[in-house]
Amino acid sequence: MDTPPPRLWDISPPVHAGSPVFPGDTPYRQDWSWTLGGDCPVNVATLTLSPHVGAHADAPRHYAPDGACAGELALEPYLGPCRVVHALGAYPLVTWAHVAHALEAPSGTGGAHHPPGPLPPRVLVRTYRHHPGDRWDPALAGLDPALVDRLATLGVQLVGIDTASIDPADSKALPSHQAVRRHGLRVLENLVLDDVPEGDYELIALPLKLVQADASPVRAVLRALPAAPTPHPEAR
């Protein structure tokens, strides 16, 4: 019997003209440059958008004047084992107390998809019961900068969240972005984790090679990790 492929969770919100953006940022717009018909054999669209529309990876250039742009980022942090942690209703900041249940030894719940194991180098935090993909949320939850510091000491290389920012929307100092900068972490924002149980997965969320951009849209996907093989009875 053929083994079915691992299950995928698409954790990217739809991107369209109604996709919310930070107030004052550039919304998504699509215009048709060419359309099928007559002597034209193809449809070709022109896109205008902020690189922070939808699920996206912040580049250091977003929060540091000398930071690397999206196209310069190494891809390794955006691909590999990750842990999804639920901190539903945490506000205004997700603190260690909200996530310790899934990060301290014994680590995580493993969900229904993988047994608990060592903390992976990528951590994604769910705060919403229902992701507000149709509106801007001025009361979005961010990450406590002390949590970012602690995750970095545990070997985490990438943090992600289902809100539009790891700092509160009215923050001017962006302390969590600056904590990420100090530790050299990478950031994913505006993920959709509504249907993802706590546990460990493979993350695939590669930024585009936008060589002058401060961020990049990603198509973020989680893939179920392979189940551990069942020991042969004679090997027990």
Image (cartoon, grey):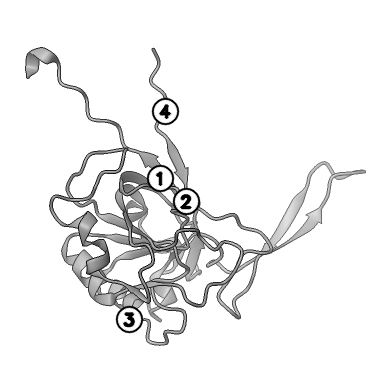
Query: Which quadrant of the view contains residue 115?
Result: top left
Residue 6 vs 110, above or below: the answer is above
Instruction: Please report whichever mark, 1 or 2, sits nearer to the chain's N-terminal start.
Output: 2
Question: First in sequence: mark 4 or mark 1?
Answer: 4
C-beta proximity under 8 Å, tags 3 and 4: no
Amino acid type of disc 2?
Ile
148 left or right, relative to 164: left
**Disc 3 to disc 1, how far (Cα)?**
28 Å
Q: Which residue is mark 3?
A: 175
- State the mark number for residue 11: 2
Mark 1 closeness class: few <14, some 14–19, many ≥20 residues within 10 Å: many
The disc at residue 5 is 4
Relative depth, front residue between 85 and 49: 85
Q: Which residue is mark 1?
A: 222
Asked whether the beta carbons under mark 1 and mark 2 sit within 8 Å of each other, the answer is yes
Q: What is the spatial separation of the Cα atoms under label 2 and label 3, in whole angstroms? A: 26 Å
